[in-house]
Amino acid sequence: MMPVLVIVGGFLGAGKTTLLLTASRMLNSRGLRTAVITNDQGSELVDTRFASASQTRAAEIAGGCFCCRYSEFLLAAERLLEFGPDVIFAEPVGSCLGLARMVRALLGGRFHLAPLTVLVDPERARELLAPGADPHLAYLFRNQLAEADLVCSTKSDLASDAVPGLEVAHRLSGRTGEGVAAWLDDVLSWRGETGRNPLDIDYGRYAEAEAALGWLNWQATVQLKEAASPAGVVGPFLESIDTGLERAGAAIAHVKVFCQAPTGWVKASICRNGEEPDVDGDLTASPSLRHDLVLNVRALAAPEVLREEAEKAASELPGKVTVTHCEAFRPGPPTPPEFAS
């Protein structure tokens, strides 16, 4: 049987990765094989490290969204077929538009297409649907909703998911698993039309909206003077990044940190300034002198500001920090995808 391809979109910080890894574990418990394709405007992704550390087969598309890297997406999906997955989850970059057209282009190929699901963080939805919302971020958010086959609210374990004027098909929590099994049953047995809401995208407006955000993908190795646990490294580092961005007037869209040590790993993320971090991994991992850090920042600020705050936070770590990768940029203009008519 053809594997099911489940594309799950949603704005930055909607909880896509956490949900998909929870869904993967559920399907694995049913005896099904799963894989995930991650995506970003740059390389060195926390999400890819997170998936691999969670024992999920992962592929990565960097340098642009799925739609603008359609050939690379197909190649990655084809390579995953060698693994024999029953279900492939695909998580596009959180600013991506045009997924409905991509879904339609994939019809009749080597995959059974699930409905295009778009995840919504209720708190973010209330912010971006409000009259005073940032126009660029609101443009991306509203268009993501418009092209969805299914809209699902996430983080139902944290707060009320009621958003005035927004109807959702499922209430989900990747953290607790609430609603995930019902959503999986829905998308895996889907027999309706997929990609039924293709957008007529103004690529100039789309480019302007994406470029409002600064992006930072940063990686370093840390050799501490005294051993510390991954959680003991991630906590102060993320707090320093958050404090610095707040001081610089940079509104956070998403900040993610992944720390790998020989003794274990921890991933922590925030979706707005001053927020309590969402944490995964082994909080009881033993102390270690060596740690590998990956940092992804998306914020309303110049890329130089993001780089400076990462450097300041790294300088506060009690040891030698060797930066192995650093990209600070605004996304270039998205190009009409190859499958556009």
Image: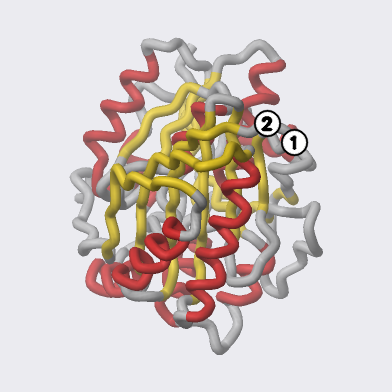
Which is more toward the observer, 302 or 105?
302
Q: Residue 28: x and y, percent? A: 65, 18
Image depth: mark 2 or mark 1 in front: 2
Residue sitting at 38 percent across and 56 percent down? 96
- Display colour scheme: secondary structure
Q: Residues within 10 Å of mark 1 (few under 14, many from 20)?
A: few
Q: Is residue 137 above or below residue 225?
A: below
Kindly report the distance in space between the C-alpha atoms of the residues bearing marks 2 and 1: 34 Å
Read off the residue under disc 1: 182
> Can residue 22 be seen at all in this image of the molecule?
no
Residue sitting at the far bottom: 132
Q: Residue 201: x and y, percent? A: 30, 65
Q: Secondary structure at mark 2?
A: loop
N-term mark: 2 or 1: 1
Residue sitting at 38 percent across and 44 percent down? 220
Q: Residue 120: x and y, percent? A: 61, 58
Residue sitting at 36 percent across and 50 percent down? 218
Q: Is residue 128 left or right of residue 306?
A: right
Q: Amino acid at mark 2?
A: Ala
Which is more toward the observer, 68 or 59?
59
Residue sitting at 53 percent across and 17 percent down? 86
Q: Is residue 80 left or right of residue 115?
A: left
Q: Residue 97: x and y, percent? A: 38, 58
Q: Is residue 241 left or right of residue 184?
A: left
Q: Amino acid at mark 1?
A: Ala
> Can residue 163 be seen at all in this image of the molecule?
yes
The mark tally for this picture is: 2
Read off the residue under disc 2: 285
